[in-house]
Every structure is written in C-alpha cells, then in structure tokens.
Image (cartoon, grey):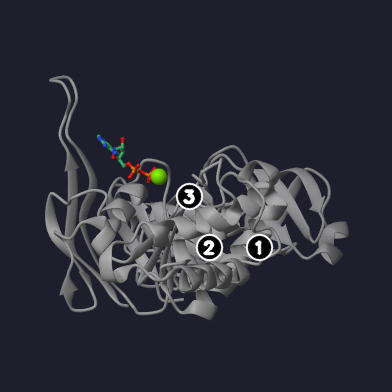
Amino acid sequence: MKVVLQNLTKRFPARSKKEKDVIAVNDFNFEIPDGKLIGLLGPSGCGKSTTLNLISGLEAPTSGHIFFGEDDVTRLPPEMRGVGLVFQNYALYPHLTVLENILFPLQNLKGKDRPGKEEMLEKAREAAKLVQIDGLLERRPGEMSGGQQQRVAIARALVKRPKVLLLDEPLSNLDARLRLQTREEIRRIQQETGITTIFVTHDQDEAMSISDMIVVMKAGVVQQIGQPQDVYDDPVNLFVATFLGTPPINVFDASVRSERLFIGEEPVLPVPGVKDGQVVAAIRPEGFVLDEKGPFSLELRRVEVMGRDTSVVSVHPAMRGVTVRSIIPSRQKGAVGGNRVRFSLLSEKVFLFDRETEARIRFDA
Ligand code: ADP
Ligand code: MG
C-alpha cells in the first residue's frame, strides 16, 4: 500500500503566554512507495513520533492530507485505517500469555470483521511463527527477554495483516547486540510480508542499515529524502552531513580563494566553480589519505586501533568540535608518528556549506 503525505502539518498550541506554539510537523510531503521500508530519522523532538501518530490516526493534523493508496484517510479513526503499531515499550498485557496478547486485536474486532475462533488461532500462530516466538506461546511477558517481548509486540501488530506497519523506536529498550539482531529481523519480516513500513529511530546506523529510503527531519521540517547511501554521499546541508556517519564528519571553518579551499592558511583542495568567501568545510573520516607530501597538516594526538578500524585523532585550529578523526587502513598505522600528520583529501568526501544558511555549495570534483 502506497502512503502519501500531502502538506502534512501539526501545530501544538502554546499552553501559556510564555510558550510558543510548536510546529511538530511542518509541511511534510512524501509519497512512500508500496512495500518499502522507510527510516524516519532525526534527533529527539524533531517530530518523528508526531508524524507516525498522524499516519496512524492517533493525532489529527492541523492541515494537510494522508492517503493510503488512492483513499484519503485523513479523517478516518485509527481502527479503520488498517495500521499495525509497535512502540519502544512493548506495551504487552502482563497478565495475558503471549498467545492471548497476539489474539487480542482480533478478539477486539466487531461484527463481520471478526474471524471465527479457529481462524483467529491460526492467524495468531502464523504471526508468532513469522517473528519466531511460536515456541513461547504459553509464557507471560514477564517470563521473556526484552527482545522476545518486542517480537510479541510485532506479532500483535501483524496479526490483522495491516496495510501499513508503523514502528516507533522499537529497538531503543534492547541492548546493543539484541538491537542489531532485531533490526535484521524487522527487515526480514518486512521483506517476507511486503508490508509498507515506517521505522522511526534517532539512530542513524539503524536507519541506514535496513531502510530502502531514509527521511531526515529537523525541528519538524524534512531535510532530505533518499536512499541511505545517496544521502550519506550527497547531503544537502550541514545538518544532514553531520547527522549521518560514525565516526561523525569533521567540520572546519574554511574559506575559498581563487577556487581553492583553505583550511587555516593551507590550500587543501581545488574547488572549481566556487566563488571566494567564508565557508564551512566538512570532511568524512574516510576522506583523509595519509600522505607525507599532502597539503593538509594537523597536530597529531593519538592513533586508536578499534577492531577493524584505525583512527588517527588530531586537532586543528580551524576545526569545530573537539578533535578531528580520520580512518586509515590498519596496515598504514606504522607511518603515523611524531607531532604532526599530513593528509591529502578525497574530493568526493569533502562537502562545502554556506556559513549563513548551511546549505550545500557544490564544486566540480
Ligand atoms: P520525536 O518523536 O522526534 O522525538 P515528537 O514528535 O514526540 O518528536 O515531538 C515533536 C515536538 O512536538 C516536540 O517539540 C514536542 O515537545 C512537541 N509535542 C509532541 N506531542 C505534543 C503534545 N501532545 N502537546 C504539545 N507538544 C507536543
Ligand atoms: Mg518519538
């Protein structure tokens, strides 16, 4: 089922004279293709949950429209929309068994929508099997791990065969290893069922790894929509560039003179087509290439070997932030020593931004 958001806006009025209205979602436009998994990504408070609540019908928009396929569902109550919801805190009924929890949404159906008893059981078992908890049907939530409880919550969301599955930070309560495992599970389930899914997270790794497309939001406003790799490789503004990537991108106050990028007093990269002026330069950690004769020199702090990666940690007077972090191949770590380190830069890993607007300034690489 395709989902269309059209000029979707949600304003929460101020509660007192001192407060201002909050525009939690500001003119959101997006056509979510049928059967895809969309990662909705942004810092806490940027409007992710509100967006999901608008799609599910738990909140009514201030203006704008939502379509499921060709149907305008903007005024439809949540139970008529055919959405499955999963939240961070699994919200299972503690006194019910796993099977009873999964059956619950079916038992709540009224009239002709309500399946017979046998059919309900069959659907519940099928959903449990899909999330691989079919061996635990008689347990109660308190007798299960967080990861297992979240699977029950997902099974419960799937049992009515929703047209759209909405997941609001579903992995936040799990420990790191389970988070990794469960996100792959979610991807598998989504691909097996083909249900259009919106997955909300503040964790860019999580969104990047399982989404067909990501939507990056800031303060209620969509910043960029695209395939994860494309957004990473081609951010439209400084916010998106800094939000994606671990370790994060390195940001410098820089300037352009005669189509050359200067960081401090050093010309570090040709930037054809850019006019003179102050800019912000952001360089991905993998954009630094160790090079004795390289144009970019920094003060070396330390070399960190972390499993597969070797990071060179350095400082520079023009950096924003605490240190500059570059990733180099481990076999080169012997070449780093002394007080300074020199690099040349990969131009496709260097992004320039306007100092005022923070919008991208493109150059011919
Ligand atoms: P996120 O899920 O990205 O953390 P939310 O959608 O929960 O963000 O919130 C977006 C903004 O809307 C925040 O500033 C939040 O304080 C505000 N907000 C959310 N729900 C309400 C509400 N019911 N009343 C007033 N303000 C709200
Ligand atoms: Mg939220």
Q: If you read the primary sequence from the N terminus, does the residue marked by circle 1 or circle 3 appear first?
A: 1
User: Does the image show residue 24?
Assistant: yes
Would you say the residues marked 1 and 2 are in contact, meaning their CB atoms lie under 8 Å apart? yes
Would you say the residues marked 1 and 3 are in contact, meaning their CB atoms lie under 8 Å apart? no
Residue 120 position, x and y percent, is 47, 68
Question: Residue 133 — which label?
Answer: 1
Task: Report the front residue among 296 and 164.
Answer: 164
Q: If you read the primary sequence from the N terminus, does the residue marked by circle 3 or circle 2 appear first?
A: 2
Residue 73 position, x and y percent, is 18, 65
Residue 89 position, x and y percent, is 51, 43
Q: In this view, does 41 lie above or below 38?
A: above
Nearer the observer: mark 1 or 3; the answer is 1
Left or right? Give the position of 361 relative to 335.
left
Task: Report the front residue among 180 and 126.
Answer: 126
Q: How far apart are marks 1 and 3 (CA)?
A: 27 Å
Residue at the limit of the structure toward the front, as seen here: 117
Residue in the image at 48% along x and 49% along y = 202
Residue at label 3? 202
Q: In this view, does 26 lie above or below 224?
A: above
Q: Quadrant of ligand 1?
A: top left
Mark 3 within 8 Å of ligand 1, using the beta carbon: yes
The quarter of the picture where residue 15 lies is top left
Query: What is the number of callouts on the image?
Result: 3
The amino acid beneath tag 2 is Ala
Residue at label 2? 155
Residue in the image at 30% along x and 45% along y = 219
Residue in the image at 45% along x and 61% along y = 157
The amino acid beneath tag 1 is Ile
The amino acid beneath tag 3 is His
The quarter of the picture where residue 35 lies is bottom left
Would you say the residues marked 3 and 2 are in contact, meaning their CB atoms lie under 8 Å apart? no
